[in-house]
Image (cartoon, rainbow, N blue to C red):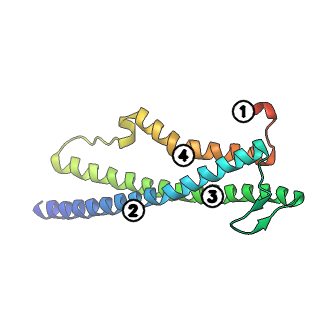
Amino acid sequence: RLKQNIIRDNDYAVLREQLSEVETAWDKIIISQRPIRRNLLVSALIALVVGRTNLVPKKIEALGVEFDTSQQLQFRVIIGAVVVYFLLCFTREVIREWDTYSNYIDIRKTVVRYRAAALGQKENFRPRFHREFLTFMSGFTVDYLIPYMMAVIGLGAVYHWFPDRFFVF
């Protein structure tokens, strides 16, 4: 019986270490998402402005580039491609975060199970985001929903996917 407790304690320590490693990886992913999210939002906003107002520069002095009428259409296509690129990068980061979060939940469940067994208590696992549903939903909206919506609206404005009455401004 003493040997089983030592094994459980060792397993518990290993699980706590794994949990710490996953939390660190998760934090790194969230930090790496910030510039990608920012770039997606900025490019989508530029696409929205260009698509709705038809403000396409005729000349970019810093680069020494001039656009004629046919090249202005290509400029819109390039802006749309940039939005798609950042949208794909952001989606990749979201998938990485979800995978890491799934690992975190699995390890956390095992830690709770070991702790409950060691203390002779009933297992009570409840993920952190379920405690405060409103906090979870506001974070989800700001971190994921708004960037995706802005990207779709920006692409729709550049490529004229939506009727003019869709945009109020």
Q: Earlier in the sequence, mark 4 or mark 1?
A: 4
Name the residue carrying label 2.
25
Left or right of 90? Residue 80 is: right
Given contact means CB atoms under 8 Å apart, are the residues at marks 1 and 3 in contact? no
Quadrant occupied by the N terminus:
bottom left
Neighbor class of circle 4 (other Cα within 10 Å; few <14, some 14-19, many 20+) is some
Helix, strand or loop at label 3? It is helix
Residue projecting furthest to the bottom:
64
State the separation of the CA atoms marked 4 and 1.
24 Å
Amino acid bearing label 2:
Ala
Q: Earlier in the sequence, mark 3 or mark 2?
A: 2
Q: Is residue 3 above or below residue 47?
A: below
Name the residue carrying label 4.
144
User: In the rendering, at what x and y percent does residue 59 appear?
Assistant: 77, 61
State the separation of the CA atoms marked 1 and 3.
25 Å
The residue located at (24%, 40%) in the rendering is: 122
Residue projecting furthest to the front:
61
